[in-house]
Structure formats: structure tokens, C-alpha cells
Amino acid sequence: MAQKLHPQARRLRTIIVTVPIMGATALVLYERLVLGKPQRTLPRPNKDEVPKESGFLADGAMRKVGGTG
């Protein structure tokens, strides 16, 4: 098992991990709120269009797990 970190080292690790995340979040919010850049969205499929891959992938996974196929 890994050696337990000193409390000061844990604080430093937390800072190193969270500062880039906070910076990226602040940049995106600045672009959206101040510069007026629109929010990014994912395209939604129509109700009539059902992706064929989803059923195929589930069937393929079942065949591999079940061993019949």
C-alpha cells in the first residue's frame, strides 16, 4: 500500500489538482458571461431516429459474456 502523505503534502496535492480546474472553469464562465459566447450543447437525436449501434453493442456484449455467439 502507498505510504501515507504528510498533511502539508496533502494540502499541496489538493492545490495542484484544484487550481487548474478552477482556472478552466473561470475561463469558460468569463467567456460565456462577459464575452457572450454561447453555451456548448450536445446535439440531440430525433425521437424517430434510434441509433442502431446501441442495440448492436448491447447484443455484442451479451454474446461475449454469455459465450453464445
Image (spheres, rainbow, N blue to C red):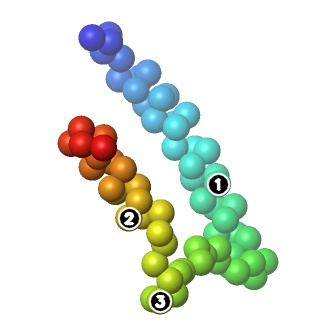
Residue designated by label 1: 24
**Camera-nearest residue between 45 and 14:** 45
- The answer to whether residue 18 is above or below residue 14 is below
Q: Is residue 43 visible?
A: yes
Residue 48 image label: 3
Amino acid type, mark 1: Ala
Is 61 left or right of 22, judged from the image as shown?
Answer: left
Q: CA distance from mark 2 to mark 1?
A: 36 Å
Q: Secondary structure at mark 1?
A: helix
**Of the residues under marks 2 and 1, which one precedes in the sequence?**
1
- Identify residue type, mark 2: Gly
Is 48 positioned to the left or the right of 61 in the image?
right
Q: Is residue 51 above or below residue 4?
A: below
Q: Identify which residue is drawn at 58% across, 44% down.
A: 19
Q: Position of residue 53 (x, y in %)?
A: 47, 63
Q: Amino acid at mark 3?
A: Asp
Chain-order first, disc 2 or disc 3: 3
Residue 27 occupies quadrant? bottom right
Q: Residue at x 42, y 64 (%)?
A: 54
Image coords of residue 39 (percent x, y): 64, 77
Q: CA distance from mark 2 to mark 3?
A: 15 Å
Q: Judge whether residue 34 can be spotted in this image.
A: no
Q: Say which residue appears at 27% left-offset and 49% top-offset.
A: 62
Asked whether, in this view, residue 42 is left or right of residue 28, the answer is left
Alpha carbon separation for disc pair 3 and 1: 37 Å
